[in-house]
């Protein structure tokens, strides 16, 4: 049985890990999460003991080298005074494909910030059909739609309202 290939199924050409000057790297626009200081310090201690174990994941954007996964790692290496690190280069893949790879590479790190993650999925859904996202992400269509709905809520308004007696203790 032959499966149909989609645009997101096209092969991502990955070069072997490369050494790279950290000063040449930029963080992708709209990095997915803020760096938690405690987690950053823990990573820095680990790098002091063991060196850089995992690579930065970068893509080419014209002449720029953009880190699309590894924000905390890049920050830790820079703070520790490293001038070079190692990375996996994904060539000139699109921002959307890089975002999907970033989600796959660090899925468990989104757990503390589901609203931020939902906003990222909503942004992706504006550029990539849901059928494509369902094939590329570890979520069913209904879960993707739920995340998009979650991102559409006005969380500032909801959290600033004082709950009524019947709403106290309820999640929504």
Image (cartoon, rainbow, N blue to C red):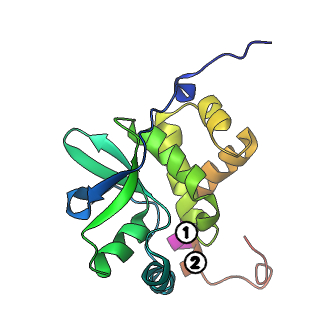
Instruction: Identify residue for label 1.
Output: 155
Residue 143, compared with residue 12, is above or below; it is below
Where residue 109 sits: x, y (%)? 59, 66
Where residue 167 sits: x, y (%)? 76, 78
Residue 104, compared with residue 96, is above or below; it is below
Q: Secondary structure at mark 2?
A: helix
Instruction: Report the residue at 39% width, 41% height from top.
Output: 95
The quadrant where residue 111 appears: bottom right
Q: Would residue 22 appear left or right of 135 to someone viewing this image?
A: left
Instruction: Identify residue for label 2.
Output: 159
Residue 150, compared with residue 98, is above or below; it is below
Total numbered badges shown on the rendered structure: 2
Residue 139, compared with residue 166, is above or below; it is above
Q: Is residue 155 magenta?
A: yes
Q: Is residue 15 magenta?
A: no
Q: Main secondary structure of the magenta part?
A: helix
Alpha-carbon span between mark 2 and mark 1: 6 Å
- Quarter occupied by the N terminus: top right
Q: Which residues are magenta?
A: 153-157
Q: Would residue 82 appear left or right of 54 to someone viewing this image?
A: left
Residue 152 or residue 162, whichever sits in front: 152
Label 1 crowding class (10 Å Cα cut-off): few <14, some 14-19, many 20+?
few
Q: Secondary structure at mark 1?
A: helix
Instruction: Report the residue at 41% width, 39% height from top.
Output: 15
Marks 2/1 in contact by CB < 8 Å: the verdict is yes
The answer to whether residue 39 shows anywhere in this view is yes
Where residue 137 sits: x, y (%)? 64, 43
């Amino acid at each position: 049985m032959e499966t149909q290939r989609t645009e997101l199924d096209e092969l991502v050409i990955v070069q072997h890990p490369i050494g790279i000057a950290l000063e040449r790297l930029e963080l992708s626009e709209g990095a997915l999460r803020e760096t938690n200081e405690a987690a950053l310090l823990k990573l820095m201690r680990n790098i002091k003991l063991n060196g850089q174990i995992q690579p930065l994941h970068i893509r080419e954007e014209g002449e720029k080298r953009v880190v699309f996964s590894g924000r905390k790692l890049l920050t830790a290496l820079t703070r520790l005074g490293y001038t070079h690190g190692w990375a996996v280069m994904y060539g000139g893949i699109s921002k959307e494909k890089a975002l999907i790879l970033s989600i796959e590479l660090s899925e468990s790190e989104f757990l503390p910030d589901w609203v931020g993650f939902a906003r990222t999925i909503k942004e992706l859904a504006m550029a990539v059909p849901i059928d494509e996202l369902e094939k590329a992400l570890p979520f069913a269509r209904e879960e993707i739609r739920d995340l998009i709905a979650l991102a559409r809520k006005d969380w500032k308004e909801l959290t600033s309202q004082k709950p009524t007696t019947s709403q106290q203790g309820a999640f929504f």
